[in-house]
């Protein structure tokens, strides 16, 4: 009887082991064959801004690697919520991914009813880049540098305004932090993307904005916008002649925009690993890295676990600021 039980147990173990091996083989084969159809890449902002430019640059290289189309799907609106919600509700098979950025870590603290859980409904894939913010100004504003802007704002409270690509972007948050640290009052005007915000500054509709350098570089060179300062603690490698906020009289100021790839929660681990590996390899291609650097971006990739920890730390940092200054999504 005892031998019979042992024999049965051994057979059961063998069956379970075979099933596990088959499942592992199936997952490995699925990862090897991924993607099996075009990949939809959600961008929760309008075309022409840093997020869009970066997505198209990386997407084109992934198309070459995968021999499958990577379709950039711009879904602006709702302070990034529209596109982010589409990503959250997509099938978790890896064929829908999205480029999310800093506001993803802020919206849970400033928006009363998000249609998704910013942590539980998403699977971080990899960080892609850290981008110093660049403060640019309409040439007609009577100020030469950040010190002049602060002095003007203090002399005439409420006379200046600033635009942003959308509420809760790094540009919005950085300006609110500047207001908090210097005691000035500047009115916020949110737009629907970096391109319309930039056009408004050039037209004089708004006086200044903080954005990714890629959005404004050409117009700075053309003299249509004036570069004032970068938001990071150190000068940007792509803009070595532009001073930092700290150098311009705001000690301790250090902010940046981050960009990363996410998938819907529940994506198979093997597919997640392939996405992480392939996207990381593309970002590290010398020509891609050089292009990102020319946009003022600092290419930065990591593991899904490291990226998840990074997002958690960003939520802690910006959540604290949001409560302190009572940020609203306008």
Image: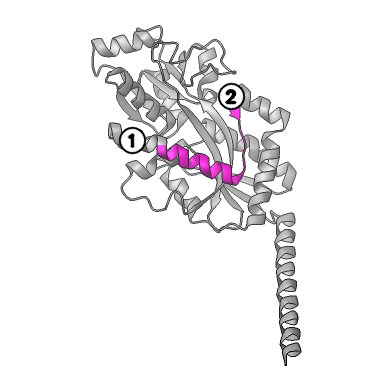
Residue 125 visible in rendering: no
User: x, y percentage for residue 141?
Assistant: 36, 10
Find out whether the residues at labels 1 and 2 contact each other: C-beta distance under 8 Å. Answer: no
**Which quarter of the figure is the N terminus placed in?**
bottom right
In the depicted structure, whether residue 209 falls above or below residue 168 = above
In the depicted structure, whether residue 232 falls above or below residue 42 = above
Within the image, what quadrant is residue 11 found in? bottom right
The residue singled out by tag 1 in the image is 322
Instruction: Identify the element where label 1 is drawn.
Output: helix
Query: Start and end of the magenta stretch?
Result: 297-316
Residue displayed at 67% across by 47% down: 69
Residue displayed at 41% across by 42% down: 77
Cα gap from disc 1 to disc 2, whole angstroms:
28 Å
* Magenta segment includes 239: no
User: x, y percentage for residue 242?
Assistant: 51, 12
**Which quarter of the figure is the C terminus placed in?**
top left
Horizontal relation, residue 34 to residue 160: left or right:
right
Magenta region, main secondary structure:
helix
Instruction: Identify the element where label 2 is drawn.
Output: loop
Horizontal relation, residue 29 to residue 263: left or right:
right
Residue 288 has which mark?
none
In the depicted structure, whether residue 81 falls above or below residue 292 = below
Residue displayed at 44% across by 19% down: 135
Within the image, what quadrant is residue 29 found in? bottom right
């Amino acid at each position: 009887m005892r031998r019979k039980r042992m024999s049965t147990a051994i057979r059961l173990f063998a069956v379970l082991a075979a099933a596990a091996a088959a499942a592992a083989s199936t997952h490995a084969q699925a990862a090897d064959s991924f993607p099996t159809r075009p990949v939809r890449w959600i961008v929760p902002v309008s075309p022409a801004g840093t997020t869009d430019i970066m997505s198209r640059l990386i997407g084109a290289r992934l198309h070459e690697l995968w021999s499958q189309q990577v379709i950039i799907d711009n879904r602006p609106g709702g302070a990034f919520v529209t596109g982010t919600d589409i990503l959250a509700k997509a099938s978790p098979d890896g064929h829908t991914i999205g480029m999310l950025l800093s506001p993803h870590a802020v919206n849970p603290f400033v928006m009363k009813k998000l249609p998704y859980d910013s942590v539980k409904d998403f699977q971080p894939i990899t960080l892609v880049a850290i981008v110093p913010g660049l403060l640019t100004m309409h040439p007609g504003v009577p100020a030469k540098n950040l010190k002049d802007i602060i002095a003007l704002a203090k002399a005439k409270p409420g006379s200046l305004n600033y635009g942003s690509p959308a509420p809760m972007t790094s540009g919005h948050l950085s300006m609110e932090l500047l207001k908090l640290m210097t005691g000035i009052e500047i009115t916020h005007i949110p737009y629907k993307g970096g391109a319309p915000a930039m056009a408004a500054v050039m037209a004089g509709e708004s006086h200044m904005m903080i954005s990714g350098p890629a959005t404004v570089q050409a117009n700075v060179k053309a003299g249509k916008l004036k570069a004032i300062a970068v938001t990071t603690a150190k000068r940007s490698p792509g803009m070595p002649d532009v001073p930092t906020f700290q150098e311009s009289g705001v000690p301790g100021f250090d902010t940046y925009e981050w960009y990363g790839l996410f998938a819907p929660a529940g994506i198979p681990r093997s597919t997640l690993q392939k996405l992480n590996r392939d996207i990381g390899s593309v970002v590290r291609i010398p020509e891609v890295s050089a292009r990102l650097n020319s946009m003022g971006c600092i290419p930065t990739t990591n593991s899904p676990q490291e990226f998840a920890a990074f997002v958690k730390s960003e939520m802690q940092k910006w959540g604290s600021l949001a409560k302190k200054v009572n940020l609203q999504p306008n």
